[in-house]
Image (cartoon, rainbow, N blue to C red):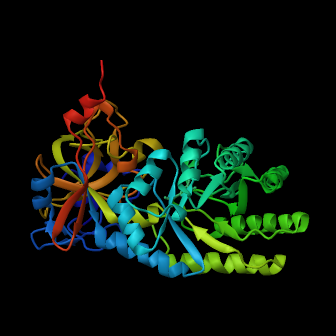
């Protein structure tokens, strides 16, 4: 359909969405498989289902807003990563993307390890039975308590992030009569092609110890001297939502360069390297993520080649995908509350959630797509912005989208690819009750994180 055929064309023609849609999709009733999880289907009447249950039933049973997580898809992604990297590598799921006990159990069953970055995440992992030796602890300012808990429970590795922490972890381990396996997180000076707030390997930022100026080499020197530490390797995480592996290539080159320096200076070959997470997913149909097997192949080849050149034995490789596993597996279901047309501008569609369940758009201009999922429509596409119900004009869920012009209060719309960094970054802003996460599989649905209640809110209020 041409834009001029749009009844609202003249009004909306001035405002081409700034985001990913240069033109409306050919058919708003079609779901683009790239952004939806694998069991999502749409009936002839336009009603979307996941895991064999339709959204009307899910909304009736669990309310809106709510995150619906496709468990089969989650497990399949875990297996794909595990199989792609094989027996001589480890896949650590990054729990910050989304963590709860059910997820920990799935990871355990599917043979993945777990990266945690706080005492809360560690507690969740342990409570759900993840063996401590399969857990890695991250963080740029771990508290003494966090370190002590990690060391005493026997986590597989602590990733050291500063000179102070090298000493801190060594002292705590010694006091507990342990020798803690550690890696040193280095910043390799790569400019990842992603948003500034999710790029983590350029030097001017808070994570890691720079390779530049010999700081990382000095960190290794210090760690090797301390009795409480067993330095097993070097870690690099270059950022998030990255689509091309060239940044990883540079990172691997520089990390292996450090291993060579260490071998030459200390006569020690560190046995492991971790190249972090950060692989991108499709938030909109324009995103073109790579499959785990391609990524694994590329990373392995880089590491093998670099080690061969450096004359080093190939270290055990690990990676830490978070978003790439859980991101595509969930969508957020909202009910439309108001539809406000601003002539000459766009139509604002207000939903019953917002920045409290998805802060990513406000935080770093994340792009999403959105679809009407409770019925089909033959109405023209309208230039829309999906906004929440919070007291901020920046409370935007989907900045630029086309939705059918007959959209009305009571319709259900869904934003796909909200499995990562949505519930885990959710807030109680405006005393919003954080939505549940509902796992759907084989015609059954169950809350794996329940909806918050007023009692939950008031329980914290002790005045
Ligand atoms: C050290 C580390 N590993 C892994 C991840 C996971 O990144 P992603 O979810 O983009 O794969 C992060 C994200 O911030 C991280 O900081």
- Looking at the image, which is closer to me, 145 or 262? 145
Q: Is residue 204 visible?
A: no
Residue that lies at the very extreme toward the top in this rendered image = 463
- Looking at the image, which is closer to me, 18 or 68? 68
Instruction: Judge left or right: residue 438 versus residue 325.
Output: left
Which image quadrant: the C terminus? top left
- Residue 349, quarter of picture: top left
Residue occupying the point 56% across, 57% down: 154
Residue occupying the point 63% across, 48% down: 176
Return the x and y of residue 440 as percentages of the image width and height.
Answer: 22, 66
Instruction: Judge left or right: residue 290 versus residue 21.
Output: right
Which image quadrant: the N terminus? bottom left
Return the x and y of residue 110 as percentages of the image width and height.
Answer: 40, 74
Q: Is residue 154 visible?
A: yes
- Looking at the image, which is closer to me, 37 or 348? 37
- Residue 178, quarter of picture: bottom right
Q: In the picture shown, does residue 287 fall above or below 149?
A: below
Instruction: Judge left or right: residue 280 versus residue 4.
Output: right
């Amino acid at each position: 359909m041409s834009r001029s055929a749009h009844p609202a064309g003249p009004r909306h023609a001035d405002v081409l969405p700034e985001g990913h849609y240069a033109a409306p999709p050919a058919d708003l009733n079609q779901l683009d498989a790239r952004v939806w999880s694998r069991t999502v289907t749409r009936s002839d009447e336009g009603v979307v289902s996941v895991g064999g249950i339709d959204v009307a039933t899910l909304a009736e049973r669990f309310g809106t807003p709510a995150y619906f997580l496709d468990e089969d898809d989650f497990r399949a992604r875990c297996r794909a990563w595990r199989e792609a990297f094989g027996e001589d590598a480890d896949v650590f799921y990054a729990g910050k993307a989304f963590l709860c006990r059910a997820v920990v159990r799935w990871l355990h069953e599917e043979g993945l390890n777990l990266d945690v970055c706080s005492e809360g995440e560690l507690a969740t992992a342990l409570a759900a039975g993840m063996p401590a030796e399969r857990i890695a602890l991250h963080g740029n300012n771990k508290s003494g308590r966090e370190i002590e808990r990690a060391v005493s429970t026997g986590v597989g590795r602590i990733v050291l992030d500063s000179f102070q922490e090298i000493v801190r972890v060594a002292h705590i381990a010694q006091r507990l009569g342990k020798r803690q396996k550690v890696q040193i997180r280095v910043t390799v000076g790569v400019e990842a092609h992603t948003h500034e707030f999710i790029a983590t390997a350029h030097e001017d930022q808070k994570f890691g110890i720079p390779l530049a100026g010999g700081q990382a080499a000095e960190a290794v020197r210090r760690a090797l001297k301390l009795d409480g530490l067993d330095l097993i390797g070097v870690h690099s995480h270059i950022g998030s939502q990255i689509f091309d592996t060239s940044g990883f290539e540079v990172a691997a080159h520089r990390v292996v360069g450090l291993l060579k320096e260490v071998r030459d200076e200390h006569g020690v070959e560190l046995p492991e390297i971790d190249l972090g997470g950060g692989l991108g997913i499709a938030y909109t149909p324009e995103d073109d993520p790579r499959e785990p097997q391609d990524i694994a192949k590329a990373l392995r080849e880089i590491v093998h080649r670099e080690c061969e050149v450096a004359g080093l034995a190939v270290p055990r490789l690990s990676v830490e995908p978070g978003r790439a596993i859980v991101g595509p597996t969930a969508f957020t279901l909202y009910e439309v509350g108001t539809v406000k047309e601003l002539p000459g501008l766009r139509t604002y569609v207000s939903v019953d959630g917002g920045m409290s369940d998805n802060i990513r758009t406000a935080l770093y201009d994340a792009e999403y797509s959105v679809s009407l999922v409770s019925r089909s429509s033959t109405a023209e596409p309208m230039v829309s912005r999906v906004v929440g119900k919070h007291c901020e004009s920046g409370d935007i869920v989907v900045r630029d989208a086309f939705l059918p012009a007959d959209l009305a209060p009571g319709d259900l719309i869904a934003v796909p690819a909200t499995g990562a960094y949505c519930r885990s970054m959710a807030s109680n802003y405006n005393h919003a009750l954080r939505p549940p996460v509902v796992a759907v599989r084989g015609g059954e649905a169950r809350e794996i994180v329940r909806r918050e209640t007023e009692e939950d809110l008031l329980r914290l209020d002790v005045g």
